[in-house]
Image (tube, grey):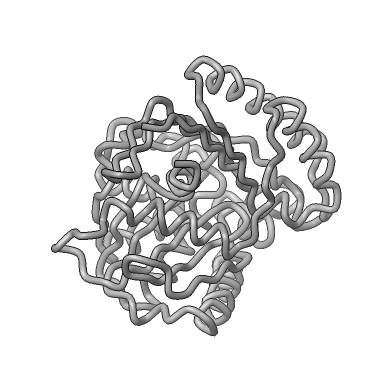
Amino acid sequence: MTRVAAIDCGTNSIRLLVADCDPATGELVDLDRRMTIVRLGQGVDRTGRLAPEALERTFAACREYAAVVKEHGAERLRFVATSASRDAENRDEFVRGVLDILGVEPEVITGDQEAEFSFTGATKELTGSDHLARPYLVVDIGGGSTEFVVGDDHVRAARSVDVGCVRMTERHLVQDGAVSDPPTDGQIAAMRADIEAALDLAEESVPLREARTLVGLAGSVTTVSAIAQELPEYDSEAIHHSRVSHARVREITEWLLRSTHAERAAVPSMHPGRVDVIGAGALVLLTIMERIGAEEVVVSEHDILDGIAWSLA
């Protein structure tokens, strides 16, 4: 067993996994898995820069994670940064801060690399599963981008496009500095058109419709599963490998886009940091399911973070 620590810093959240990995058996045992909403991508779509307050929230989470990594005695640490820090003019400031706190330089990876990690993390346990048809389409709906990966045991094609729950919310649902509560039909239509255009882009290089099993990753998808199951609180075990039908995803998405901030915040499984962006994230998922004709989505709690951990093992 190799004890490793993986950090995934996205547009909306930063996550840590400390785990023992055994490459010989394919076993990964969690020691600590946690997530903090830092909204690193706040305003990046509009300004092209990481906001000072977003950087400070992220650095505070890094200081907490550094203590956890030290406590567990991880032998190797890898910090991967995705969409927001890839796009920002002042990303050097972000890199220096992470290096000072954690002693490793964040790897600002490409969308294709992000997709590879996501596929490995999501499907390593599914490989050899008789009841799930291949090829898989792994969809990782993040804050700033969505990754599409088609593969069997290995990746066949991958593409990252710039639609995510934070980016879509900021681009289409913010009016006079506040998120519409609830959004108008026009705002929803504009957001859907943006998502459809991104799917057209993805289909130029990834055969989305060849997939036989849709595997959905990240907070928007796992939250939809939690709502579908009417969980009294967020429960990773209940969510991992759950299945949500197309009809149920449509029903939940329509409710999220009709609801007020207070109604969404009252959902017991809803993380406070997702309340304003979950409607956009759910619409991305629904639009994908409609595009490929998926009857259900298999929800995975294992994703890019697990892929990063395996890369260290």
Quadrant in the picture for the C terminus:
top left
Indicate whether 159 appears above or below 146: below
Q: How many labels, in total?
A: 0
Quadrant in the picture for the N terminus:
top left
Query: What x and y, as percent, mark residue 302?
Result: 38, 46
Tell which residue pokes out farthest to the front in this image.
24
Indicate whether 310 appears above or below 266: below
Query: What x and y, as percent, mark residue 112?
Result: 57, 65
Q: Is residue 162 left or right of residue 294?
A: right
Q: Is residue 305 left or right of residue 183?
A: left
The front one of 243 and 134 is 134
Residue at left offset 58%, top offset 52%: 143
Residue at left offset 54%, top offset 84%: 204
Residue at left offset 37%, top offset 75%: 290
Residue at left offset 57%, top offset 49%: 181
Evaluate whether residue 164 shows in this view: yes
Tell which residue pokes out farthest to the bottom in this image.
204
Query: What x and y, as percent, mark residue 245?
Result: 25, 62
Question: Which quadrant of the figure has residue 22?
Answer: top left
Indicate whether 54 appears above or below 286: above
Question: Which quadrant of the figure has residue 200?
Answer: bottom right
Query: What x and y, as percent, mark residue 79?
Result: 61, 40
The front one of 20 and 283 is 20
Tell which residue pokes out farthest to the top in this image.
71
Q: Is residue 151 left or right of residue 47?
A: left
Evaluate whether residue 257 shows in this view: no
